[in-house]
Amino acid sequence: MTTTKMTMRAAWFLALTFCACSHEHGLAGNWNLESPKDARISHIEFEDGGKRAQLGVTSDQQGHGHVLLEYAEANGTVVLNGAWEGHDVQWTGKFADDQLLLQGPGGEMVFHRGEHRH
């Protein structure tokens, strides 16, 4: 095999490896609420490589808005903590593949990974 071919294959392999490893965790990106349909949360966006998450929420006073939370994730479990409308809140749950289940204020919520939608 020529040096040029070996160099090109090595570059291709590194590019594929970089793409496969570019996310710090499986939560990065947007998750849309699937149920319950009447929840005040519409979506969650997890920061890639960080520890912050942004909830898309509805309120009677302001319509659609966002709440910034901190999160921790390990081995398929997640904990979200923060303040919403003057109250400390916490959600705990599990994620696998493209499904996220959270339990907290208001009961259980099911999210699926996907493009942001309102």
Image: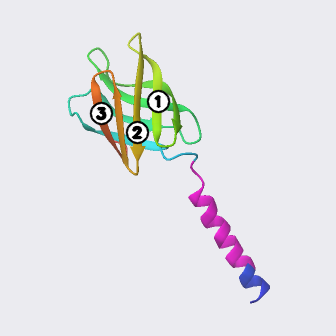
Residue occupying image coordinates x 49% and y 47%? 26
Query: Label 2: how many residues lie within 10 Å, few (<14), some (14-19) or many (20+)?
Result: some
Bounds of the magenta span? 7-23
Q: Nearer the viewer, residue 96 or 59?
A: 96
Residue 84 place in picture, x, y as percent: 40, 17
Q: The N terminus is located in which quarter?
A: bottom right
Question: Mark 1 or mark 3, which is nearer the start of the sequence?
Answer: 1
In the displayed structure, would residue 15 be above or below residue 32? below
Residue occupying image coordinates x 73% and y 81%? 6
Going by the picture, which residue comes out furthest to the front? 75
Real-space CA distance between mark 1 and mark 2, rounded to the nearest whole angstrom: 9 Å
> Which element type, helix, strand or loop, lies under badge 3?
strand
Residue 60 place in picture, x, y as percent: 26, 16
Residue carrying label 2: 94
Residue 81 place in picture, x, y as percent: 47, 23
Taking 51 as reference, is 65 left or right?
A: left
At label 2, the amino acid type is Lys
Q: Determine which quarter of the picture holds residue 10.
A: bottom right
In the displayed structure, would residue 65 be above or below residue 26? above
Q: How many marks?
A: 3
Q: Is residue 107 visible?
A: yes
Task: Tell me the tag on residue 48.
Answer: none
At label 3, the amino acid type is Met
Question: Mark 3 or mark 2, which is nearer the start of the sequence?
Answer: 2
Task: Tell me the tag on residue 109.
Answer: 3
